[in-house]
Image (cartoon, grey):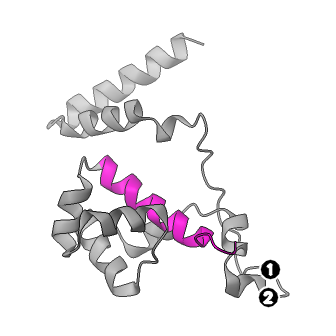
Amino acid sequence: MAGGPNPVDVHVGGRVRLRRTLLGMSQERLAEAIGLTFKQVQKYERGANRIGASRLFDLSLVLGVPVSFFLEEMANTVAAASPRARGRSEPPPAPLPPAPIRDGDPISRRETLELVRAYYRIPSCEVRRRVFKLTKAVAAAAR
């Protein structure tokens, strides 16, 4: 870990990027909304710079998620890599759900993000429900 970003910071930055992308928001727009430059947002998203508590709170407001969103789905190996956790002799208090696999993971593909954004742009709840059912039926028939 010496010389590189803390894996927890990388995870939090990845969650910022995920939510921003799901919303179809540019780094420039996010930076403007929280009073930073887009370069600073880039550094946050890479985990190169840590995000302080007040900034994390601002990000949660702008991105429309609770602060806890940024720590969700953190792998135990990432949590254990935090310097504070490495000094503990006992395991973390509660196991965290595994992080999604990024290589080949359909959630991280642009096509998936575009599909999700398009789906939520459908104004009618009933039409969205029908599209959802249709998609599940097509997937089941393709097996």
Task: State how far apart marks 1 and 2 are (Cα).
Answer: 7 Å
Farthest residue, direction top: 142
> In the rendered structure, which amino acid carries the disc numbered 2?
Arg
Q: Which residues are magenta?
A: 1-22
- Residue 83 image point, x, y percent: 69, 83
Q: Position of residue 40 (x, y in %)?
A: 32, 69
- In which quadrant of the rendered view does residue 92 lie? bottom right
Instruction: Identify the residue at image location x=72%, y=83%.
Output: 85
Give SS at disc 2: loop
> Mark on residue 91?
1
Identify whether 140 is placed above or below 19: above
Rendered residue at 66%/56% (across/down): 98
For the C terminus, the image quarter is: top right
Disc 1 to disc 2: CB gap under 8 Å: yes
Q: Nearer the viewer, residue 72 or 79?
A: 79
- In the picture, measured across the screen, residue 52 lies left or right of residue 10, that is left
Q: Is residue 122 above or below residue 6?
A: above
Q: Quadrant of residue 69?
A: bottom left
Q: Check disc 2: other Cα within 10 Å, few if <14, some if 14-19, many if 20+.
A: few
Number of residue marks: 2
Q: Is residue 19 left or right of residue 35?
A: right
The residue carrying mark 2 is 88
Q: Main secondary structure of the magenta part?
A: helix
Q: Secondary structure at mark 1?
A: loop
Q: Residue 4 colored magenta? A: yes
